[in-house]
Amino acid sequence: MKKRELIFAAVIIAAFALPSCRKDYTCTCTTTVLGISATKTYDLPNQTHKDATEACDRFENDANAGAPGTTNCHL
């Protein structure tokens, strides 16, 4: 019975620990205007995957707000 409890506790701890893993990400944005493309990268150091994704989405939304052309960003 102790072994089962230990495994259950380890699974619970891992479930809480994994989402908070932080690492460095790079957001790559490509803007296309009149058939001409330009790419820019943004470093996102020490971020969770969720936070990095949200930041990259903000870069895309800000670039597309009222600007000519289309910008697509991804991690």
Image: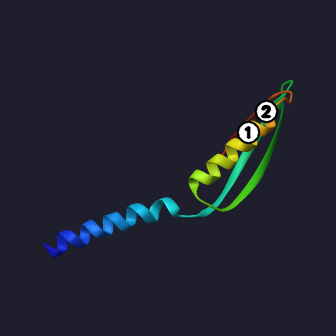
Residue 75 visible in the current orientation: no
Q: Quadrant of residue 74?
A: top right
Q: Quadrant of residue 67?
A: top right
In the image, is residue 20 above or below residue 37? below
Task: Calculate the distance from the C-alpha at mark 1 to the C-alpha at mark 2.
Answer: 6 Å
Residue at 81%, 31% (x, y): give it.
32
Residue at 58%, 64% (x, y): give it.
22
Residue 19 coordinates in the image, percent (x, y) = 49, 59
Residue 69 coordinates in the image, percent (x, y) = 83, 27
Q: Secondary structure at mark 1?
A: helix
For the residues labelled 1 and 2, say whether their Cβ atoms are less than 8 Å apart: yes
Q: Amino acid at mark 1?
A: Glu
- Which residue in the rendered view is the most extreme toward the left? 1
For label 1, the residue is 60
Residue 57 coordinates in the image, percent (x, y) = 68, 42
Residue at 73%, 39% (x, y): give it.
60
Q: Amino acid at mark 2?
A: Asn
- Which residue in the rendered view is the most extreme toward the bottom? 2
For label 2, the residue is 64
Name the image quarter holding the N terminus: bottom left
Q: Dot 1: few (<14), some (14–19), or many (≥20) neighbours within 10 Å?
A: many
* Closer to the camera in the image, 69 or 61: 61
* Closer to the camera in the image, 19 or 26: 19
